[in-house]
Image (cartoon, rainbow, N blue to C red):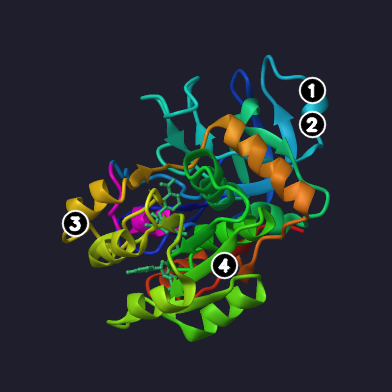
């Protein structure tokens, strides 16, 4: 099998030929058709993710065909077309993951390869309306968006939602899901072009978070959001607290811009805000996400497709976030 290996931090992944994988008890080997990139892969390559171990194969998202089944796995799985839930060992508590929780692609070898080995419980049938590239773009980002909006954010039809940094992979799914759920959606972005794309996908409009007075414009035009979905935090977090409607929820799944500089706790308690964290999702969230995607015929927005041999170019491009939606790797026909 072919695998892209992180041999040294901050250096390009190295393409290596390795022995074909053998499934252990309860596991399957999947011949990958496509994989997709997440910001996590970039953080791992840059050594900015906790516990990075050189020698691993990154990649959390993948879709393909079951090639081999290990002991204890029904052989009828062989030949099935699947996508992978990359959240391993979430545990039994829907509110929070267990101490054993892991994400495929570090420490367990991931999907930037021609084959991957995962426990059979991670598999779901490829939705029939998605091709291989679309199926591979779905798992991690769509799961995170689904839990952020629905399980943690408790989105109700008719509410106003603000989604920050709409160029992001998770943000794009959050936009599609919130629109289908009947919310009024506003976005932020550093790019007018990305705001325009978001409007074409059903957003009411957008605001450039890099401009100093964007919140004034937002209040005038959009009012106050009941739910904010944010992955940036940083100095802009206080703007979100300022904008939020009384009783609003602010749900964070990342801190791309670092920790908030200042938290106005007076506004937090006076407006009775709920500041909530969220991470990927449980097995129930994953099934809920897939059912929602199938019911509404949602297709991931793919910015660009790269061959596996060009993964380093995709990772390099992620440094400056020019993309709108997902970068996908085509692995085999
Ligand atoms: N907790 C979890 O389970 C989980 C899951 C997935 C991702 N994450 C984290 O969430 C973040 C986004 O992940 P992703 O995969 O969706 O990333 P991505 O596709 O790489 O998103 C990058 C986008 O972030 C936006 N951004 C950057 N700085 C910003 C700022 N100061 N304010 C608002 N937006 C800003 C930009 O949007 P514009 O281009 O529109 O300006 C950029 O395009 C990362 O930190 C990632 O590690 C966490």
Q: Look at the image and say whether residue 91 sits in the magenta stretch.
A: no
Mark 2, secondary structure of its residue:
loop
Q: What number is the disc on residue 78?
A: 2
Residue 79 screen position, x and y as percent: 81, 37
Residue 85 screen position, x and y as percent: 59, 38
Q: Is disc 2's CB within 8 Å of ligand 1?
A: no
Q: Which residue is mark 4?
A: 325
Gap in angstroms between the C-alphas marked 1 and 3: 57 Å
Marks 1,3: beta carbons within 8 A: no
Q: What number is the disc on residue 264?
A: 3
Of pointers 1 and 3, the one earlier in the residue sequence: 1
Point out the stretch of residues depicted in magenta. 39-50
Q: Is residue 299 left or right of residue 169?
A: right
Residue 39 screen position, x and y as percent: 43, 58
Q: Which residue is mark 1?
A: 75
Mark 4, secondary structure of its residue:
loop
Gap in angstroms between the C-alphas marked 2 and 4: 32 Å
Marks 2,1: beta carbons within 8 A: yes
Mark 3, secondary structure of its residue:
loop
Residue 113 vs residue 185, the one in the foreground:
185
Q: Is residue 135 left or right of residue 231?
A: right
């Amino acid at each position: 099998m072919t695998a892209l290996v992180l041999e040294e931090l901050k250096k390009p992944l190295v393409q290596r030929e390795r022995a074909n994988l053998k499934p252990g008890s309860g596991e399957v080997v999947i011949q990958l058709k496509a994989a997709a990139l997440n910001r996590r892969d970039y953080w791992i390559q840059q050594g900015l993710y906790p516990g990075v171990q050189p020698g691993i194969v990154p990649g959390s998202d993948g879709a393909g065909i079951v090639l081999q089944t290990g002991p204890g796995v029904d052989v009828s799985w062989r030949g099935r077309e699947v996508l992978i839930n990359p959240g391993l060992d979430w545990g039994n508590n829907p509110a929070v993951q267990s101490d054993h929780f892991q994400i495929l692609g570090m420490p367990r070898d991931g999907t930037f390869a021609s084959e991957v080995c995962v426990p059979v419980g991670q598999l779901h049938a490829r939705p029939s309306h998605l091709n291989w590239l679309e199926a591979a773009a779905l798992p991690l980002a769509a799961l995170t968006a689904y839990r952020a909006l629905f399980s943690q954010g408790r989105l109700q039809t008719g509410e106003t939602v603000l989604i920050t940094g709409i160029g992001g992979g998770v943000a794009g799914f959050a936009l599609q899901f919130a629109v289908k759920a009947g919310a009024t959606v506003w976005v932020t972005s550093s790019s007018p072009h990305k705001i325009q794309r978001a409007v074409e996908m059903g957003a009411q409009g957008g605001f450039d978070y890099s401009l100093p007075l964007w919140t004034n414009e937002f209040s005038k035009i959009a009012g106050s959001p009941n739910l904010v979905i944010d992955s940036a935090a940083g100095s802009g977090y206080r703007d979100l607290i300022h904008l939020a409607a009384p009783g609003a929820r602010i749900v964070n799944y990342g801190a791309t811009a670092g920790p908030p500089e200042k938290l106005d706790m007076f506004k937090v308690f006076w407006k009775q805000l709920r500041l909530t964290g969220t991470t990927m999702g449980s097995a129930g969230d994953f099934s809920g996400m897939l059912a929602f995607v199938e019911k509404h015929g949602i297709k991931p927005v793919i910015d660009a497709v790269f061959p596996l041999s060009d993964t380093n170019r995709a990772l390099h491009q992620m440094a400056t976030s020019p993309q709108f939606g997902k970068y996908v790797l085509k692995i085999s026909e």
